[in-house]
């Protein structure tokens, strides 16, 4: 591909280098409007037409019975802070979708017990409920609340793997606590203490006893540790002590994540589950939402970096099918990057990159003048801060 064709292909994704973005004079308001449009593009088919979702998957895989809970749980985890803002009617539609999913008598009831996968996506659904205490947790009708509690409790029959899966069990229990139901402290304690054992240093946990070079520290580990401890951390002195360390480690990893985003919105295509696209930056988005970015990393540079990643991974031609459903890929339609556990529903973890939409339009994240992120500075000859291990 010659240089002109290469630049045209980049421009087609919307992932323009920062200098050209400046020429377009994009403001925080422009970025926020774009993020909201992406949120609705992801949400509308899942909340309105979930029963009709196609199932793209690896050859020979059979994900039909788990993929729809994947789509709903992961989407709700990502859009929950926006639902909490209450700027549109999406919270009503989300509550209705969840109510139908957990009602055993509904034709739209979803599977929470068959296979092992439902534990994962019940946990993402639980995480979303924790992130929207008014719009979701406290707003379900009594019958929907009872069904939701029963559905979450039913996942206890699934034994988690000895890895990041322990946090799925812990997140389900944290949500049960938040819903006022009986919850199992042992499942929470086990997940917290094991991850303390698995901490490798410099903001990184092992996925189980071993280190894996992938994005699971961001997909699952840091965000769920933070959310579980936000809910349960005051239940014991030991958990309060762990919570302080968890938050400092998450801050360090958020700083690393910001540096991983290239000036064109690309990032290293390493490790498994790369088809989650911009969901690889779950932790960075969560840190921005929580005003927990590390010193020297401004909200406006994170806004620019995340906007660039979202554009690069979701605006590429072929990302959505003709009916608006996501297709497997990292940048466009690339079925070969889908592992055997990846299917259409899995892909909606990309929505977690949108967590900062929970911040009001008046927040610095949206109002501050655009600033180049670290890679833009580094690779355009500008001064940039060097990095140090924590």
Image: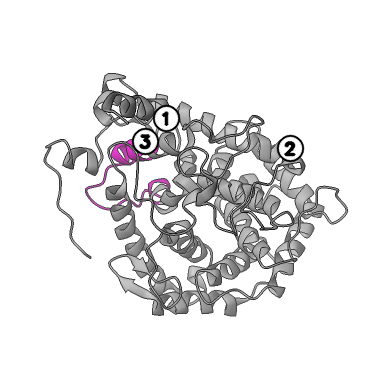
For this view, does 291 lie left or right of residue 49?
A: left
> In this rendering, is residue 170 above or below 104?
below
Quarter of the image that includes the N terminus: top left
Q: Mark 3 or mark 2: which comes first in sequence?
A: 2
Question: Is 218 inside the magenta-drawn segment?
Answer: no
Q: Which residue shows up at 41% across the image and 62% down it?
A: 217
Q: Which residue is mark 3?
A: 308
Q: From the viewer's perspective, tell me whether residue 79 is left or right of residue 143.
A: left
Tell which circle, 3 or 1, labels the residue nearer the N-terminal end.
1
Q: Position of residue 134 (x, y in %)?
A: 61, 47
**Residue designated by label 2:** 49
Q: Residue furthest top?
A: 24
Residue 28, percent from left and from top = 37, 28
Is residue 86 shown to the viewer in this render?
no
Residue under numbered circle 1: 13
Distance Cα–Cα, label 3 vs label 2: 29 Å
Magenta residues, start to end: 287-307
Q: Nearer the viewer, mark 2 or mark 1?
A: 1
Element class at badge 1: helix
- Identify which residue is drawn at 47% across, 74% down: 192
Quadrant placement of the C terminus: bottom left
> Can I make out residue 51 in this image?
yes
Q: Say which of 214 and 374 sits in front.
A: 214
Q: Position of residue 223 (x, y in %)?
A: 46, 58
């Amino acid at each position: 591909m010659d240089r002109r064709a290469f630049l045209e292909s980049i421009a087609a994704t919307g992932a323009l280098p920062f200098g050209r973005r400046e020429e377009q004079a994009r403001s925080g308001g422009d970025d926020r409007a774009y993020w909201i449009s992406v949120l609705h593009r992801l949400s509308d088919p899942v909340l309105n037409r979930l029963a009709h979702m196609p199932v793209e998957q690896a050859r020979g895989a059979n994900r039909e019975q788990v993929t729809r809970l994947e789509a709903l749980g992961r989407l709700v985890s990502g859009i929950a802070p926006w639902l909490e803002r209450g700027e549109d009617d999406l919270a009503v539609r989300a509550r209705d979708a969840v109510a139908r999913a957990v009602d055993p008598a509904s034709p739209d009831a979803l599977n929470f017990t068959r296979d092992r996968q439902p534990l994962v996506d019940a946990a993402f659904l639980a995480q979303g409920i924790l992130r929207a205490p008014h719009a979701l947790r406290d707003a379900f009708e009594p019958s929907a609340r009872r069904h939701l509690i029963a559905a979450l409790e039913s996942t206890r029959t699934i034994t988690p793997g000895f890895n990041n899966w322990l946090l799925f069990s812990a997140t389900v229990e944290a949500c049960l606590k938040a819903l006022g139901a009986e919850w199992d402290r042992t499942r929470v304690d086990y997940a917290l203490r094991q991850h303390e054992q698995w901490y490798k240093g410099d903001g990184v946990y092992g996925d189980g006893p071993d280190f894996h070079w992938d994005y699971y520290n961001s997909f699952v580990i840091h965000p769920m540790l933070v959310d579980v401890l936000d809910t349960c951390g005051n239940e014991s002195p030991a958990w309060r002590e762990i919570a302080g360390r968890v938050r400092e480690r998450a801050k360090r990893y958020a700083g690393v994540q910001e540096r991983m985003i290239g000036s064109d919105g690309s990032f290293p295509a390493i490790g498994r589950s790369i088809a989650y696209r911009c969901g690889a930056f779950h932790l960075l988005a969560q840190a921005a939402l929580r005003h927990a970015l590390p010193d020297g990393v401004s909200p406006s540079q994170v806004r620019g970096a995340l906007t660039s990643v979202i554009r690069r991974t979701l605006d590429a031609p072929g990302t959505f099918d003709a009916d608006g459903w996501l297709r497997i890929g990292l940048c466009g339609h690339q079925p070969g990057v889908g592992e055997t556990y990846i299917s259409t529903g899995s892909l909606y973890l990309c929505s977690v990159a949108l967590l900062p939409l929970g911040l009001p339009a008046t927040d610095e994240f949206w109002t501050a003048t655009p600033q180049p992120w670290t890679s833009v500075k580094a690779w355009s000859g500008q001064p940039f801060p060097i990095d140090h291990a924590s």
